[in-house]
Image (tube, rainbow, N blue to C red):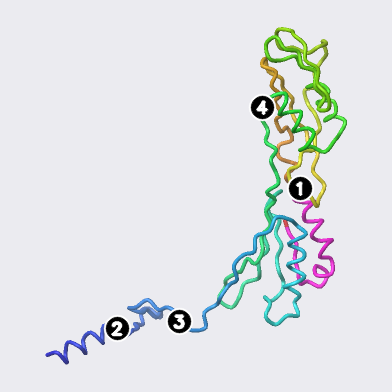
Amino acid sequence: MIEKALRYLVGLKENKTYEIDGKTYSDHKLEQITGLYHYPATVHVESLDAIVKLIRAEYTGKNPDAHKPPLFVRVEGPTSVEVFTRLDDIACRSTPYEAVCRDVNFKEGWRGQQEAIIELRSRFIPTDDSAYLLGLISRINNEEGVQSTDNGVSQTVTAKKGVSLMATEQVKPRLSLQPFRTFREVAQPESEFILRLDEDGRVGLFEADGGIWKIEAKINIAAYLSSALASEVESGVVVVMI
């Protein structure tokens, strides 16, 4: 009785196959336990230069241990680049590198006078319109009874009530500005912003180009990578795409 029970249990573990309508089926889930593929963990960096150096140092196309060419470099967005391999023997890909620009802190919306001045000085490339906006903000009277003239270098404060401009002037509703919004190795796209000033003296900047700057940023990134990896691209080892 015990022997029959053991044979029955062993039989339960045996894999059985069935041919049905020309297709083979198994009554057990099969898993590969030898010859498994091991994919390296993705290396995360924060610059385009790091991506270029990694590809050149670890992926040459001549290294037998490297992935088979080509290596694909895809610009996912203004702040992200992904590097992945071709399909392997089991139709899988590896993603050895990824670059994400984390030094992007510009956000559209409302900000106070002081915050706007600091932001224009540190998070924008100087242009004629940024200089105009900086001068405009410095002439805003704010803070209930306090008149402040501040150009980011010196500040004068006198007593005066209300929020207004020191002189009557027409404010430009649209400005062309270049905030830092992508990798530092490439040119920062210039785009239009709608300028608004509210009754509390806050400054509002709102993107007005429909996101075209993102396309321009991706083109700039792809151009940089294609140039930095020119020999690899020409030989077909690396493919840069948007």
Q: Which residue is mark 3?
A: 33
Residue drawn at x 81%, y 73% as measured from the top left: 235
State which tag comes first along the sequence, 1 or 3: 3
Instruction: Measure the alpha-carbon separation of dots 1 and 2.
Output: 58 Å
In this rendering, the count of numbered labels is 4
Residue drawn at x 80%, y 44% as measured from the top left: 188
Residue 165 pos. (x, y %): 78, 13
- Judged by depth in the image, the label closer to the viewer, 4 or 3, is 4
Instruction: Measure the alpha-carbon separation of dots 4 and 3.
Output: 58 Å
Instruction: Measure the alpha-carbon separation of dots 2 and 3.
Output: 16 Å
Would you identify the image quadrant in which residue 63 lies? bottom right
State which tag comes first along the sequence, 4 or 3: 3
State whether residue 201 is above or below residue 52.
Answer: above
State which tag comes first along the sequence, 1 or 2: 2
Residue drawn at x 81%, y 27% as measured from the top left: 152
Q: Which residue is mark 2?
A: 13
In the structure shown, which secondary structural element does the residue marked by tag 2 occupy?
A: helix
In the structure shown, which secondary structural element does the residue marked by tag 4 occupy?
A: strand
| Disc assigned to residue 110 | 4
In-front residue for pair 111/223: 111
Residue type at the position of mark 4: Trp
Q: Which residue is mark 1?
A: 217
- Magenta span: helix, strand or loop, mainly? helix
Dividing the image into 4 quarters, which one contains the C terminus?
A: bottom right
Farthest left residue? 1
Instruction: Measure the alpha-carbon separation of dots 2 and 4.
Output: 67 Å
In-front residue for pair 235/138: 138
- Judged by depth in the image, the label closer to the viewer, 2 or 3, is 3
Cβ atoms under marks 2 and 4 closer than 8 Å = no
Residue type at the position of mark 1: Ala
